[in-house]
Each structure stands twice: as structure tokens, then as C-alpha cells.
Amino acid sequence: MTTNDAASATQRVEFDQLSAPVADGSDVNLDMILDVPVTLAMEVGRTRISIRNLLQLNQGSVVELDRSAGEPLDVFVNGTLVAHGEVVVINERFGIRLTDVISPAERVRKLR
């Protein structure tokens, strides 16, 4: 098959238009993505240390974070900040109570 034959044998594929969130609050059909798994992570705090200090860490070492005790945790979905919350214990398991949720419009703005 020559290059011209291959080019004439190809067909143009058309995809349905996907709807995006609308800022005016109108309903958007999200059924297509409701079962897509995402990663939810809570961050207590962060710090920067040298590799030398990292290699010296062992059991019992204490690492100071950039947050004060009692400060809200950050809640991330796939690396995007979506809320703040506080740690709770439910049936001997840790959980988080959301205290502040970032608005959908603000989350979309941060994605751009």
C-alpha cells in the first residue's frame, strides 16, 4: 500500500461534544464520569530537608512540619486542593471532617 492509498483509506472520526461545567450553575450531565476513580489525600503539613538529614532519619526521629497544631489539614483530589478539614476518629479509624470546601468555580479556575 502506498502513502496515497493509506491516506485515502483513512476515515475522519467525529466525537460527541463533551459538556463542561458552566459558571452560571446550570445542570451539567456528569453521568459519564461518576464512576471514574480519583485519589483523595489529606496533608498534615510539609517540610524541606537535605538528603543528608533524610538519610539520618530512623525510627523515633521527629520531623517538624510547616503547620501549627490545630491548623486545618488540606484535602486534595488528584493533587488539586478541594477542601480543608480536621482529623476525627470514627470506630478506631482516622477520618476527616470537612470545615471549608473550595467552590467548584474556584477549583476549575485553579485547573487552568
Image: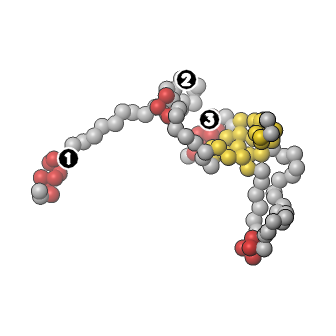
Q: Residue at x 78, y 69 (%)?
A: 57
Q: Amino acid at mark 2?
A: Ser
Residue tagged 3: 105
Which numbered disc flags the more N-terminal residue, 2 or 3?
Answer: 2
Q: Position of residue 111 (x, y in %)?
A: 58, 45
Q: Position of residue 5 (x, y in %)?
A: 12, 52
Which numbered disc flags the more N-terminal residue, 1 or 2?
Answer: 1
Q: Say which quarter of the image contains residue 16.
A: top left
Q: Classify 10 Å Cα crowding around label 2: few (below 14), some (14-19), many (20 and above).
A: few
Q: Amino acid at mark 3?
A: Ala
Instruction: Report whether 3 appears left or right of 77.
Output: left
Answer whether residue 88 is visible to the viewer in this image. no
Residue tagged 2: 26
Q: Along the line of sight, which residue is nearer the eye, 61 or 24?
A: 61
For the residues bearing labels 2 and 3, Cβ distance under 8 angstroms: no
Q: Classify 10 Å Cα crowding around label 3: few (below 14), some (14-19), many (20 and above).
A: few
Seen in the picture, residue 89 relative to 61 is either above or below; the reply is above
For the residues bearing labels 1 and 2, Cβ distance under 8 angstroms: no
Cα separation, mark 2 vs mark 3, equals 13 Å
Answer whether residue 57 is visible to the viewer in this image. yes
Mark 1 or 2, closer to the camera: 1
Q: Residue at x 76, y 57 (%)?
A: 46
Cα separation, mark 3 vs mark 1, equals 40 Å
Q: Position of residue 102 (x, y in %)?
A: 69, 37
Q: Say which quarter of the image contains residue 24.
A: top right
**Outermost residue toward the front?**
92
Q: Residue at x 77, y 45 (%)?
A: 73
Q: Secondary structure at mark 1?
A: loop
Q: Along the line of sight, which residue is nearer the eye, 104 or 92?
A: 92
Residue tagged 1: 10
Seen in the picture, residue 4 relative to 39 is either above or below; the reply is below
